[in-house]
Amino acid sequence: NAGVTQTPKFQVLKTGQSMTLQCAQDMNHNSMYWYRQDPGMGLRLIYYSASEGTTDKGEVPNGYNVSRLNKREFSLRLESAAPSQTSVYFCASILTSLDRGREQYFGPGTRLTVT
Amino acid sequence: SQKIEQNSEALNIQEGKTATLTCNYTNYSPAYLQWYRQDPGRGPVFLLLIRENEKEKRKERLKVTFDTTLKQSLFHITASQPADSATYLCALAGPEGNTGKLIFGQGTTLQVKP
């Protein structure tokens, strides 16, 4: 199993450009999450999908949109990138949000710089 | 709103000693708490989960305690090794029921010197 994969690994955008970060998991997990990590701020939840077909806002959703394409894939879109969105983005998944399987599995991250 | 705090200063210890990291939280009572390890340039990796009705959990050289009265978790690494050097993240279950959402602390960097 590859676990959680993310593409691209690195990206540089100019202000106003758009892009989509891709995330896929091959563990048959139900729930998926997008975080951003900034120095001194810890991981902050952008959006999550508790199950296929549902998405909900997290702590910092402004400037982002998501799509849960199917059970495996959860993409994050920046419609008009801003320098404040320079960050490291992590995707994560869990087997279930019920009593068991709550540990999150993370991808390797996408390092995004907006100039 | 929920607040979770970890010591932002790096913890430097000598190989063989026990490292103790602290996680404090305010404003609500999480159903469970998790600890993750993060190496530079990589995603976090799950280490341990402890539930609100558990006082202590162990896994090999790792031990986690959960004091819901003090609203604090302690994470111990015994017989520490240079390979244990990393950033350790504390995460609390979000209050919104069964969404699997976590609230993360900012992490504490541990440096184990040989």
Image (cartoon, grey):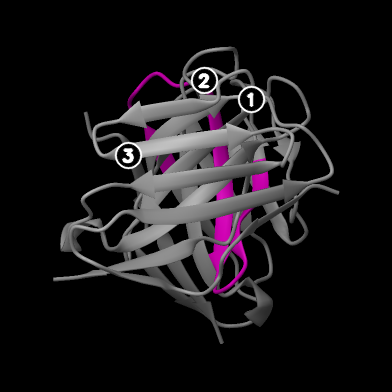
Pointer 2 chain: A
Q: Which residues are magenta?
A: A23-47
Pointer 1 chain: A
Q: Are marks 3 and 2 on the same chain?
A: no
Q: Quadrant of residue B86?
A: bottom left
- Residue A33 versus residue B50: which sits nearer the camera? B50
Indicate whether B69 appears above or below A6. above
Residue pictured at 56% horizontal, 87% vertical: A115
**Residue A14 image offset from top left, x and y in percent:** 56, 83
Residue ranking furthest to the bottom: A115
Cα separation between marks 1 and 3: 30 Å
Task: Report the amino acid beneath label 1.
Answer: Ala
The residue to which callout 3 is attached is B62
Instruction: Assess disc 2: are there few (<14), some (14-19) or many (≥20) residues with their C-alpha within 10 Å of its C-alpha.
Output: some
The residue to which callout 2 is attached is A30
Residue pictured at 47% horizontal, 55% vertical: B21
Instruction: Assess disc 3: are there few (<14), some (14-19) or many (≥20) residues with their C-alpha within 10 Å of its C-alpha.
Output: some
